[in-house]
Image (spheres, grey):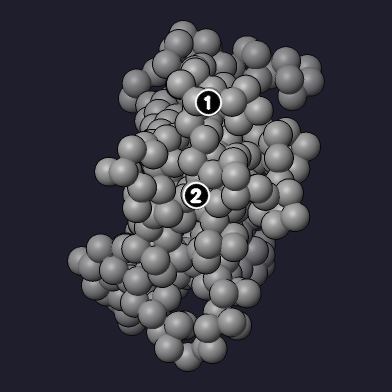
Amino acid sequence: MTALARLRDSDMWWSFRRSPITVAAAVITLLYFLGAAFAPWVAPYDPFDVKSLNLMDAFTPPAWNSGGSAKHLLGTDNQGRDVLSAILYGTRVSLMIGLAAIVLSVTTGVLLGLLAGFRGGWLEAVIMRLADIQLTVPAILIALTLDGVARAALPKNVHDEIAIWVLVLSIGFAYWPQFARVTRATTLAEKNKDYVNAARIIGVPGARIALTHVLPNAWGPVLVIATIELALAIIAEASLSYLGVGMPATQPSLGTLIRIGNAFLFSGEWWIVIFPALALVILSLAVNLLGDWLRDALNPKLR
């Protein structure tokens, strides 16, 4: 039986097909990822090519409004950039930062959780107390602090060039404790079972036991948390960019577009901020709904 056939016969596929909301969320998320991945080919214009910008097109309303143009479906901003194109490119940046930050959080949290649960003793106490301390501080404040340190330590032009990696490190470091706690709990439940003891008896190294025998049992809960944390990471990046400490205007994410558009909200150019904000809300909601479905689908008590 092929992997595809096994997937079609699985409980998860049955649960997925039975939930129209989950199917809709998956389709929306897929469209976001495809739009972000193929933004240079899908977007009507390159919004960051200075040569193609025309200030005479600035503040053009959406196509269905009076004064709108069919060339700019969602209108243009204060510099004449096409809002739809800017959203596609901004989504690309937001998803890139969110995914990279979650990969960093998962890698750090899972390895520390495995180490704490498998080794125990003072090492476990130190790792988990650090996680508990960090969990008492909102993730956005941790990210703000790390980003502030980077801004103080680096010249502005250097920081702008590596802003995306500063955000990835800041957000990724803020979310590792959740993964460490879940992985540690799974490790504690698995490390004294017969298959682990048998591996020890035949001389399998402890690191190999942890990575190849214990870790696979933790991937279910980790995947659920990673899906939900992806939405939080995207929102955290948008929050930082909205506060002016995230991506620069030359490489805008959705948060940067919202910050730029907010300045024109009360002067009547509402589309500059509303459409990027809607894009962020819909993306975060769709990813969260997928995370909720994964949590229920992977819970054996609900099967």
Residue 249 % position (x, y): 53, 62
Please tell me the numbered disc located at residue 78.
2
Q: Residue at x 46, y 21 (%)?
A: 66
Quadrant of res 275: top left
From the image, which quarter does the C terminus lie in?
top left
Residue 203 % position (x, y): 66, 67
Please tell me the numbered disc located at residue 68.
1
Q: Is residue 87 visible?
A: no
- 247 sits left or right of 178 in the view: right
Mark 2 lies on a secondary structure that is loop
- 48 sits left or right of 278 in the view: right
- Nearest to N terminus: mark 1 or mark 2: 1
Q: Is residue 89 above or below residue 63?
A: below
Residue 75 % position (x, y): 53, 33
Mark 1 lies on a secondary structure that is loop
- 255 sits left or right of 51 in the view: left
From the image, which quarter does the N terminus lie in?
top right
User: CA separation, marks 1 and 2?
Assistant: 15 Å
Q: Is residue 28 above or below residue 174?
A: above
Q: Amino acid at mark 2?
A: Asn
Q: Residue at x 75, y 55 (%)?
A: 51
Q: Amino acid at mark 1?
A: Gly
Of 60 and 31, which appears nearest the observer? 60
Disc 2 crowd, CA 10 A, few/some/many (<14, 14-19, 20+): some
Of 23 and 217, which appears nearest the observer? 23
